[in-house]
Image: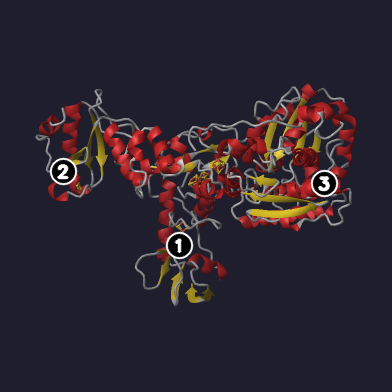
């Protein structure tokens, strides 16, 4: 242990700790901007400077290792003065655009300007006037707001191994740019949105489409129907001042009705359905010698990744559409019929933790119903804005139930929101289908948690099935390279593009630290425990769907509406 | 020589990408996109990194430019010694502004940072060869070497 004092407080921390870490131990808050709790030290903003006794120069607390006997001062006039000047210099190159900014109220730079009461900046404002990039349906970039911290670059390269973002030029000319300085859409970007979470400011964000929803609600000829993805409930409360996991599902539904949705249904319903289709697909591949390992196909960021980097492995992907895209065509066929509503009038909106879902819904082939299957995708953050704009007081709101035919769900669908959940849900069903026995303990603990790669073995009546689970695309890449090399020992692989799974999706409330992802994962399993039914094949509304409409898993209707195919993306530069 | 062959010849050198870029530029006077992508492949880097290297160093250009690259030092010592007048003379002589290339593709004018010859300012370089103590009067003779 190393002993030092910070602002007169004695502290001992392990060797190799930084001043920043030591200060946190004793509750001294040092401001940061480029620092990220789960990333490598960048030390490029200098906002965290402190005085170290005996040193002439100020030290960057995020990078400076502690030393025995060190005396650190974090609040001297010299320190405050330096931090203010640094902030003034950053702000002198920054658009004064907070009122119009997607991160207004949730921006690390804005917070710092506020904490250091920056008023009359002595430096002349000089904004570079760089082009905004709205080339993708999911993500926009506003490089003028970039403070060059490089956190997005680390998210895209180290966490996701996509390498769509990099640096261009140096010094005052440097910029973060998509590959070859082009538009994001021409890079390998998979639209996962992890760069949004990494960004301290409003330089990257989701393409907002709330206005389209408001127009549909105002249109008397439209029946506005919504589906809520499994990972949304645990996080939406964070947008309206609640703790993670605290928003009750029925209150969430009531809130959506207040906003003006005509019918509220659940993606969890099609998550259960996915298990039946995908579980049977796996069994068929095992029995008939189909392409193995089979990969899950729920995560559109992962689909984009596979189509971009592993086009030779597309046959391994399950042909099942994602739960969102299974919901789409069913809402405009089966459900419309059940309800006696003209499908042409249905405006189908999904509420997703994901930015890549916007891209997925817009894929040209997603029109199996004869209409656009999903008309609009809103992220959890956009729905948060919608709730705040509508001034809904959730404390006073009485709960409301989901509408019929596509609103029922089981605990197996709930856990789709966390990495390993699809696998666990599939195992609960496949086990019972294959063995004919009742699964007494439905909990497969090994599949849970935020660990990058997890593996398990299940004995299905003498056949041992080996499975693996990866979250985060650099972890997925390891499993894919194994498959490509012909060395994969697995039969079934679950991949979620985002760290922790959908609870950490690019559309969730801004999530700086992985610790928040873990909190959400914990809430998911609490909700699963509370469900009376926890196996997808026991979902009563799914049973009705098969009895009356689909007839059997992998049947003719399923193939028409619920299954798809994939295409190599052939990006110019990777 | 084709850019592919040039890059391939540096493949086994550690950090060879910089030398490969210099060699490609010697041939083509700039680094076309395809050459950057080829370097990424040969040196096993993501294209975004190869592009980052190509744009980090001011002596590389990823946009087409004149064959003979004239770079004028604009660091303080050269500046004080009259770099501005040298610039004016070069611009007049070639009929282009700083940052541009001549229509016949013969010359490009660029700024540089200190090239380490501060004992004899102002300094310009043409295709990396330094010219010391340059004045507006000596500009036409220097250019004549390349015409
Ligand atoms: S990025 Fe932050 S500081 Fe900049 S305009 Fe947006 S809210 Fe304001
Ligand atoms: S959305 Fe994902 S893949 Fe695209 S730039 Fe951001 S981190 Fe990279
Ligand atoms: S875009 Fe955001 S995360 Fe990326 S370097 Fe700029 S400020 Fe940092
Ligand atoms: S937070 Fe320490 S240098 Fe940026
Ligand atoms: S300042 Fe021009 S060569 Fe050093």
Specify the label residue A390 is tagged with. Answer: none
Label 1 – label 3 distance at C-alpha: 50 Å
Q: Nearer the viewer, residue A533 or A286?
A: A286
Q: Residue at x 64, y 53 (%)?
A: A453
Q: Position of residue A250 (x, y in %)?
A: 82, 46
Q: Are marks 1 and 3 in contact (CB under 8 Å)?
A: no
Specify the label residue B122 is tagged with. Answer: 2
Residue B62 visible to the viewer:
no
**Disc 3 chain ID:** A
User: Is the CB atom of the residue marked by disc 1 within 8 angstroms of ligand 4's nearest atom?
Assistant: yes
Q: Nearer the viewer, mark 1 or mark 3?
A: 3
Residue carrying label 3: A429
Q: Position of residue A399 (x, y in %)?
A: 84, 46
Question: Alpha-carbon neighbours of circle 1 within 10 Å: few (<14), some, or many (≥20)?
Answer: many
Mark 3: secondary structure: helix
Mark 2: secondary structure: loop
């Amino acid at each position: 242990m190393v002993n030092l004092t910070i602002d007169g407080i004695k502290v001992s921390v392990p060797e190799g700790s930084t001043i920043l870490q030591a200060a946190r131990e004793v509750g001294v808050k040092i401001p940061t901007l480029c620092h990220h709790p789960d990333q490598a030290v960048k030390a490029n903003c200098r906002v965290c400077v402190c005085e170290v006794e005996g040193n002439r120069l100020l030290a960057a607390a995020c990078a400076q290792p502690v030393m025995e006997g060190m005396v650190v001062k974090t609040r001297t006039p010299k320190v405050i003065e330096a931090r203010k000047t640094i902030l003034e210099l950053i702000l002198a190159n920054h658009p004064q655009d907070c009122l119009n900014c997607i991160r207004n109220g949730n921006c690390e730079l804005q917070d710092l300007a506020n904490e250091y009461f920056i008023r009359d900046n002595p430096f002349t404002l000089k904004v570079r006037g760089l082009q905004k990039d709205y080339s993708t349906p999911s993500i926009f970039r506003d490089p003028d707001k970039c403070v060059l911290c490089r956190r997005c670059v680390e998210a895209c390269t180290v966490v996701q191994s996509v390498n769509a973002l990099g640096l261009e030029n140096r010094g005052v000319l440097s910029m973060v740019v998509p590959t070859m300085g082009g538009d994001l859409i021409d890079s390998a970007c998979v639209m996962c949105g992890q760069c949004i979470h990494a960004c301290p400011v409003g330089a990257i964000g989701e393409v907002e489409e709330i206005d389209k929803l408001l127009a549909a609600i105002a249109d008397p000829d439209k029946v506005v129907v919504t589906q809520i993805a499994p990972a949304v409930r645990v996080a939406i409360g964070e947008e309206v001042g609640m703790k993670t996991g605290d928003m009750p599902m029925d209150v969430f539904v009531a809130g959506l009705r207040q906003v003006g949705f005509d019918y509220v249904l659940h993606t969890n319903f099609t998550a259960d359905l996915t298990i039946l289709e995908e579980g049977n697909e796996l069994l068929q591949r095992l029995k008939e010698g189909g392409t193995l390992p089979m990969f899950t196909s729920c995560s559109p960021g992962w689909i984009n990744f596979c189509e971009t980097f592993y086009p030779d492995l597309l046959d391994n992907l399950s042909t099942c559409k994602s739960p969102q895209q299974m919901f789409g065509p069913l809402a405009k066929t089966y459900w419309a019929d059940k309800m006696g509503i003209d499908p042409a009038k249905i405006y189908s909106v999904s509420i997703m933790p994901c930015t890549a879902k916007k891209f997925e819904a817009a894929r040209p082939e997603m029109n199996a119903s004869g209409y656009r299957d999903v008309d609009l995708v809103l992220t959890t953050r956009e729905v948060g804005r919608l709730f705040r704009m509508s001034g809904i007081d959730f404390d006073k709101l009485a709960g409301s139930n989901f509408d019929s035919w596509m609103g029922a769900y089981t605990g197996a669908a709930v856990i789709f929101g966390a990495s390993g959940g699809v696998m666990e849900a599939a195992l609960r069903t496949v086990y019972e289908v294959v063995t004919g026995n009742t699964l007494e303990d439905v909990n497969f603990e090994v599949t849970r948690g935020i660990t990058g790669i997890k593996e398990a073995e299940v004995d299905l009546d003498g056949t041992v099935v080996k499975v693996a689970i990866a979250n985060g695309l650099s972890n997925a890449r390891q499993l894919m390279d194994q498959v490509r090399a012909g060395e994969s020992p697995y039969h079934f692989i679950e991949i979620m593009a985002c760290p922790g799974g959908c609870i950490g999706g690019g559309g969730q409330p801004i999530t700086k630290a992985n610790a928040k992802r873990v909190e959400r994962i914990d809430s998911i399993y609490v909700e699963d425990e509370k469900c009376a039914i926890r196996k997808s094949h026991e979902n009563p509304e799914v049973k009705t769907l098969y009895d009356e409409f689909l007839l059997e898993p992998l049947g003719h209707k399923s193939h028409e509406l619920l299954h798809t195919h994939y295409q190599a993306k052939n990006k110019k530069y990777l | 020589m084709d850019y592919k062959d040039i890059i391939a010849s540096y493949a086994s050198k550690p950090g060879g990408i910089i030398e490969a870029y210099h060699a490609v530029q010697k041939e083509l006077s700039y680094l076309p996109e395809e050459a950057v992508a080829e370097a990424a492949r040969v040196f096993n880097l993501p294209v975004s990194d190869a592009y980052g290297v190509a744009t980090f160093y001011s002596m590389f250009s990823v946009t087409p430019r004149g064959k003979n690259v004239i770079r004028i030092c604009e660091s303080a010592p050269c500046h004080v010694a009259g770099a501005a007048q040298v610039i004016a003379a070069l611009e007049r002589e070639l009929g282009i502004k700083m940052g541009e290339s001549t229509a016949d593709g013969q010359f490009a004018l660029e700024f540089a940072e200190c090239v380490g010859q501060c004992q004899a300012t102002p300094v310009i370089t043409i295709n990396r060869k330094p010219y010391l103590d340059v004045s507006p009067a000596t500009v036409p003779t220097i250019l004549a070497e390349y015409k």
